[in-house]
Amino acid sequence: TDTTTTFPEGFLWGGATAANQLEGAYDEDGKGLSIQDVMPKGIMAPPVEGPTPDNLKQVGIDFYHRYAEDIALFAEMGFTVFRFSIAWSRIFPNGDEETPNEEGLAFYDRVLDELEKHGIEPLVTISHYETPLHLARTYNGWASRELIGFYERFARTLFERYGSRVKYWLTFNEINSVLHAPFMSGAIATPPEQLSKQDLYQAIHHELVASALVTKMAHEMVPGAQVGCMILAMPTYPLTPDPEDVLAAKEAEHANYAFGDIHCRGEYPGYLLRTLREAGVELDITDEDHEILRNTVDFVSFSYYSSLCETADPAKRTEGGGNIFGGVQNPVLKASEWGWTIDPVGLRIVLNDYWERWQKPLFIVENGLGAVDELVEVDGIETVVDDYRIDYLNDHLVQVREAIADGVDLLGYTSWGCIDLVSASTAELKKRYGFIYVDRDNDGNGTLERYRKKSFDWYRDVIASNGANL
Ligand code: BG6
């Protein structure tokens, strides 16, 4: 490894969260329901009719009331950036109102006040898996073109209100995840097994147009705005050197690259047009849409947890695949307790691939290990001895340093779930990512007290040394 290269001056270090996974207060101060309020089991079961008390997101970790204490803890670790999302249904409870909910707006003023107090740069995700439920039920989410207008109004409201205080904006969390989770990601109420490719890709088109439109608007309204797309990064390796496997891996990567290509180049790539053509999909793309798509992003952000493996040989497809997002098991890599392949080198590969492909600054806005933690007493202090998490993060950050040595332009790193929160895919609290332990379990029991884990001190030292101690 190249230990002579250091992280650049001003590199942004911090953590990442999403409103629906930590705020709680799901119906307070005029907040409307979001799709998350009918997803008590995450993506592991179909949505239910209405809110149910077994939904851990109703309380989350009560960040809505404890944000000041939590941000102070982030400051103690030395965060220079904090990624959070704005719950759309706090601002527009149904999503299609003309005027915003003032109490919702005021909450994020208070959050920004705290961040400012500690000199922490906000990084705001406009839409993170929490579309107002009404937009899913009445319009079928992003399958409807009308969503573009509602999203535009939502974003305009945010830029007007927070534009002088927030420079970094992300349009849609993991925009490509709509391929796998159309309800959570795209608020598309049609059950996945009934959703046609036609409707899915039309929905994707609407999101892409909305993303470009809002990028344009940010550039006009927000001084010094930096707008990024956000992609779920899944580098995909061929299972063998058989060219057919290499091609299968490339095609799997194309499915995800398409989102970045459109955000960075402002037009549909040829391989996607071919896929659509062969699937008999004919998209409704207006002349104006083509114009709007030309408003490309300033940077590319992504989440990275694991790599995938692909083969062209159907006989090699094992039951369950290699990951929740498909592929086959990689025979040389181990996986987390939740079956997510652990691959630090994959992060270096992604950073190089994205940089070579788009030549735009990159931002790692999610990375981390979901694991079961145990609160223990060490020298009279309650903590979690999470060496496994330290190892995971250290190994990944070493590869980040390698990529920087390779010449990759990287703005920052925000590890996922810097404080324990409700998981997105399985909607549980047992799967913890944080540097800060929150006393609340899968049954909703616990004091909600916060405790510093061993990784808390480790990350503080990483930030203080700007990565020199990795
Ligand atoms: C990403 C999401 O997919 O991964 C987050 O943007 C999510 O919302 C994170 O929490 C980790 O996934 P999970 O299912 O372990 O929470």
Image (cartoon, grey):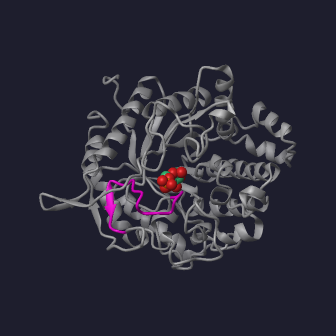
| Quadrant in the picture for the C terminus | top left
In the shown orientation, is residue 422 left or right of residue 271? left
Residue 105: x %, y % from top left: 53, 70
Q: Does 435 sit above or below residue 241? A: below
Indicate whether residue 176 is drawn in magenta.
Answer: no
| Quadrant in the picture for the N terminus | top left
| Helix, strand or loop for the magenta stretch, by majority | loop
Q: Which residues are magenta?
A: 424-440
**Residue 415 visible, this angle:** yes
Question: Viewer-proximal residue, 99 or 381?
Answer: 381
Question: Viewer-proximal residue, 401 or 420?
Answer: 420
Question: Viewer-proximal residue, 223 or 3?
Answer: 3
Q: Identify the residue shown where x is 48% and y is 59%.
A: 423
Residue 3: x %, y % from top left: 31, 24
Residue 35: x %, y % from top left: 62, 67
In the shown orientation, is residue 435 left or right of residue 62? left
Instruction: Find the residue positioned furthest to the left.
Output: 379
Instruction: Find the residue positioned furthest to the front.
Output: 315
Number of numbered markers: 0
Q: Does 38 sit above or below residue 389? A: below
